[in-house]
Image (tube, coloured by chain):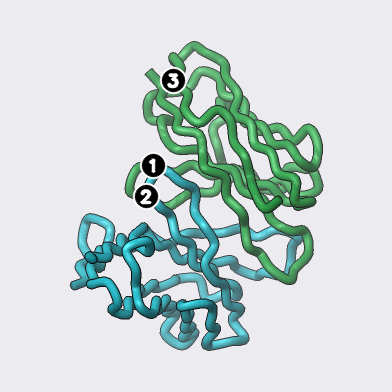
Chain colours: A cyan, B green
Amino acid sequence: GESVGLHLPTLSVQEGDNSIINCAYSNSASDYFIWYKQESGKGPQFIIDIRSNMDKRQGQRVTVLLNKTVKHLSLQIAATQPGDSAVYFCAEIPNAGGTSYGKLTFGQGTILTVHP
Amino acid sequence: DTEVTQTPKHLVMGMTNKKSLKCEQHMGHRAMYWYKQKAKKPPELMFVYSYEKLSINESVPSRFSPECPNSSLLNLHLHALQPEDSALYLCASSQDFGQTYEQYFGPGTRLTVT
């Protein structure tokens, strides 16, 4: 199940299940969003991105949903595997397109644990 | 080559030491970034270089001094650090045009200040 408190939110699933990781963002000017996966001892790894003119984008086994009305982002992982166990961060960029770089602000992260 | 490399992997330094962290990418990216990450926290942006010029300094103390000698290299010079500066320091890079803002991260340097 999922818990939110003083610690990072956690999600525990069985191998083969679908996982949904949620993220709330606060900046209404954010128009570009990225999901990153970070395994222990490694840097964040890009999973998928979405622009604010879209509400859904699909990748390989992953889908990102964006609800701008309630400023909510979710990452769905199909057929979750033990190798998916990691910390997942959403990140937002406000006013993307106005500069040649992206000023990323990361969310707090969710720990995903996949049990065989 | 889609890799960002960072050296050293681990660094232990005293509060009076001077050391440098190095980052390198050969993807032709013209934006490079330094982040600081404490345990169980998300990365926090420190500096952004765009076309080898400092574009963002997120009010980082002057004991951290970034340098971008060329488009492939990014350094972070450290001097008179405090124990609370112990963290994972991540370097990232991204393309310079607005099709994507994907940032490629290196593995980080684990810094311990004693």
Q: Which residue is mark 1?
A: B38
Secondary-structure class at tag 1: loop
Quadrant where the image shows the C terminus of chain A: bottom left
Within 10 Å of the Cα at label 2, are there few (<14), some (14-19), or many (20+) other Cα atoms? Answer: some
Q: Is residue A34 above or below residue B12?
A: below
Q: For residue A103, what is the image quadrant?
A: bottom right
Q: Amino acid at mark 1?
A: Lys
Q: CA distance from mark 3 to mark 2?
A: 21 Å
Q: Amino acid at mark 2?
A: Lys
Secondary-structure class at tag 2: loop
Which chain is mark 2 on?
B
- Residues A63 and B60: in front is A63
Q: Is residue B91 above or below residue A68?
A: above
Dot 1 and dot 2 within a common chain: yes
Residue that appears at 32% across and 63% down: A82
Q: Which residue is mark 3?
A: B12
Q: Do the residues under discs 1 and 2 have CB atoms within 8 angstroms? A: yes
Residue B79, image x, y percentages: 55, 19
- Residues B85 and A48: in front is A48
Secondary-structure class at tag 3: strand
Residue A104, image x, y percentages: 56, 59
Q: Which residue is mark 2?
A: B41
